Image (tube, helix red, strand yellow):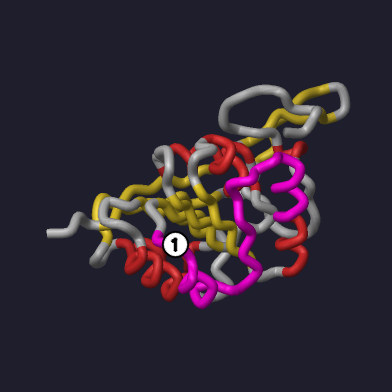
């Protein structure tokens, strides 16, 4: 754990992560995503399109008995993932430097899946994750474009998914404006989740 953060609980400040040009899931969205994920001890968790790894790392820290796989195709993202995992001492996090959905074939079956980046293959990734999830497993998707929001809603409306849920988050953070204060808006994100149907 970094020396500049000694507290427990979800919602690590964005500033404690090593960052580059790769997108990072911001604190407010991270907390709500993990709440939707409903992690339990001993689970296998996939973070597809993990970017800098902020979500994967928080999941790994929250449930140390879990095994988290952070899948990222971007070379800079992979390097940042490795650096951040080392920084936080997340021995239960494995970085997978490859593109989904092909990268997912050799991974252990997950009970929980996060989908962030999709490289233009969102529907294919959601379909494959639906096949591999254990019954009652939970999938949470974060998207920032209306097109991907529609694709996600459509795919999660069909088998094997059920209990679809979602919210749109647009947080604003307190900032200084000269001698005054103001709230600076962050990018809006759709957080959409579903559960895999039980085996009949």
* Res 144 seen here: no
Q: Residue at x 40, y 61 (%)?
A: 109
Q: Nearer the viewer, residue 153 or 124?
A: 124
Quick check: can you spot residue 124? yes
Q: How far across and down, in percent of the image, does residue 175 sit? A: 76, 30
Quarter of the rendering containing residue 181: top right
At x 25%, y 66%, the residue is 158
Q: Which residues are magenta?
A: 81-109
Q: Residue at x 43, y 75 (%)?
A: 124
Q: Position of residue 107 (x, y in %)?
A: 48, 66
Q: Is residue 45 above or below residue 150?
A: above
Label 1: how many Cα within 10 Å (few below 14, some 14–19, many 20+): some
Q: Nearer the viewer, residue 43 or 39?
A: 43
Q: Is residue 27 magenta?
A: no
Residue 8 falls left or right of residue 111: right
Quarter placement of the N terminus: top right
Q: Quadrant of residue 134?
A: bottom left
Residue 95 belongs to magenta span:
yes
Label 1: which residue?
108
Residue 138 is situated, as x and y percent measured from the top left of the image, at 36, 51
């Amino acid at each position: 754990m970094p020396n500049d953060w000694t507290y427990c609980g979800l919602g690590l400040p964005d500033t404690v992560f090593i960052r580059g040009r790769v997108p990072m899931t911001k604190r407010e969205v991270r907390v709500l995503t993990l709440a939707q994920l409903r992690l339990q001890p001993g689970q296998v968790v996939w973070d597809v399109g993990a970017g800098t790894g902020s979500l994967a790392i928080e999941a790994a820290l929250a449930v140390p008995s879990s095994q988290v796989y952070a899948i990222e195709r971007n070379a800079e993202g992979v390097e940042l993932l490795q650096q951040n995992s080392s920084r936080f001492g997340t021995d239960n996090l494995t970085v997978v430097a490859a593109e989904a959905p092909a990268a997912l074939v050799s991974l252990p079956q997950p009970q929980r899946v996060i989908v962030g980046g999709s490289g233009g293959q969102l529907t294919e990734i959601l379909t494959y994750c639906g096949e591999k999830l254990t019954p009652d497993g939970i999938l949470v998707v974060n998207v920032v474009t209306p097109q991907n929001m529609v694709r996600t809603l459509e795919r999660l409306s069909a088998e094997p998914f059920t209990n679809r849920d979602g919210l749109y988050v647009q947080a604003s953070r307190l900032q200084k404006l000269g001698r005054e204060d103001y709230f600076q808006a962050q990018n809006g994100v759709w957080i959409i989740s579903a559960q895999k149907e039980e085996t009949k």
